[in-house]
Image (spheres, rainbow, N blue to C red):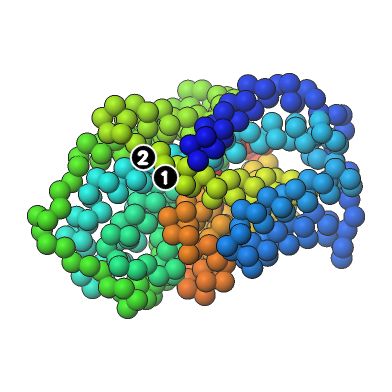
Amino acid sequence: MHRLLTGAIVAIFSILFAGPALAAAAAGGAAVAGPKLFGVPVDFFLFGATLLSVALFHHRTFTVAVTGLSIIIVYKFIFTGFPPGPGVGGLLAHMWHERIILSNLLLLLLGFAVLSRHFEDSGAPEVMPRFLPDNWMGPLALLGMVWVVSGFLDNIAAALIGGVIAKHVFEKVHIGYLAAIVAASNAGGAGSVVGDTTTTMMWIDGVSPLDVLHAYIAAAVAWAVFAIPLSLKQQAYSPIQKHEIGHHKVDWGRIGVVVFILVSAVGANAGANLYAPKLLDVIPMIGLAVWFAIIVGGLLRKPNLKVATDSLKGSLFLLALVTCASLMPVQALPPASWQTSFGLGFISSVFDNIPLTALALKQGGFDWGILAFAVGFGGSMVWFGSSAGVAVSNLYPEAKSVFKWIAGGWWIIVAYVVGFFALYLTLGWHPHEPHRLTAPSMITDDGGH
């Protein structure tokens, strides 16, 4: 597995440095319109069949995703070509265009798996029960902590920290509560330009942080709707465990490494946005910053790289789905409206929210706070709908079932609807004019997908 991890990292750098040659290899012309069924391009049926197969065969998700991606690529070779052009050149050029998103996502998922193990080995999760109530308010307080932490950290990290703590404070974790941890992380990042990839994209593209802040109205209402019943469900399923005070000690050196990794990720993101935004289109700054911090932190505490190799297969599964989504012929969204934004929340539960957000930014005319909540929180409805969900499911493989996720955490769907309309009915729909003529830079994924 260590060879597989090394191969994946080498592949990332090979794509990065071979990129100009790959892009130049693309043939001229764009993709052509392919066959349609009921007025819908066949591409979407192939993608839908892949997602349905993931739901049905949740013990073979990686195989299903890779098979679906292969079928879509073959179909586009024969019938439509790729967005940059036909043939091998078009495929290579498309992968070059997506390189930063995919490499950042892979590096972050693997890096945060190492981070979560540092946190787990620090002893802090065993100490948490001292500060959490020993009734249903305990799991509720943990969800509140994840919500708050996600507002200033990446929501993948917030979800993983919540998942690690849950492993130690509950003997068993209900799938509905796992979904609640993911939903709390996505809700917490919805109104912050550093808490979710989609809001960061908006910030990079020129949207003011104040223009997404009101997403927290919907996020707070949604949190209350799903957090209370799912906390009650978790407490009934497996009550929070009490630990004797003084029995566990915290390794503050490992906590320092965790903080250093998180600060490096946030610092690289904010620094590049402020001082070198073009760099984000050239190298996966945030993912590289995380691994640089892991290596430097290794001088103080040795990282457990085995957890990265163990999560590699699940991470590649998500990359396969993201690549499938990027190949879909989504040329334009319906006219910007609250109805469109509401629908995008459901679409983002199965369709990567990065290209959806990019299209919305290019089109303009959206209320960015409403859109931020929709595409950020909407991915919580399905386990692979956000990077936070995929990361948590790597910790809890039993969560990789669409049916169990929805059956256990259906309150999240209710929370999305209630939260959305709480914001819309409170503040109304306030669209912004298009502020750029070009599409935004697309950097990393977090979940909000």
Q: Is residue 259 above or below residue 288?
A: below
Find residue 240 and report its horizontal and vertical position in percent. 25, 69
Numbered label tally: 2
Residue at image point 71% right, 52% down: 67
The residue nearer to you, when weighing 432 against 231, is 231
Which quadrant of the structure image shows residue 170? Answer: bottom left
The extreme bottom residue here reads 236
Residue at image point 43% right, 39% down: 111
The residue identified by callout 1 is 307
Q: Dot 2 surroundings within 10 Å: few (below 14), some, or many (20 or more)?
A: some
Residue 271 in view (yes/no): yes
Q: Is residue 429 above or below residue 30?
A: below
Find residue 153 and report its horizontal and vertical position in percent. 38, 44
Are the residues at dot 2 and dot 1 in contact (C-beta closer than 8 Å)?
yes
The residue identified by callout 2 is 304
* CA distance separating discs 2 and 1: 6 Å
Q: Is residue 363 above or below residue 165?
A: above
Which quadrant of the structure image shows residue 216? Answer: bottom left
Find residue 242 and report its horizontal and vertical position in percent. 18, 66
SS assignment at label 1: helix
What amino acid is at disc 1? Val
Residue at image point 20% right, 70% down: 134
SS assignment at label 2: loop
Q: Is residue 223 above or below residue 188?
A: below
The residue nearer to you, when weighing 208 against 233, is 233
Residue at image point 42% right, 45% down: 307
Residue 182 in view (yes/no): no
Decide if residue 422 is on the left or right side of residue 126. Answer: right
Find residue 341 and report its horizontal and vertical position in percent. 62, 58
Decide if residue 330 is on the left or right side of residue 65. Answer: right
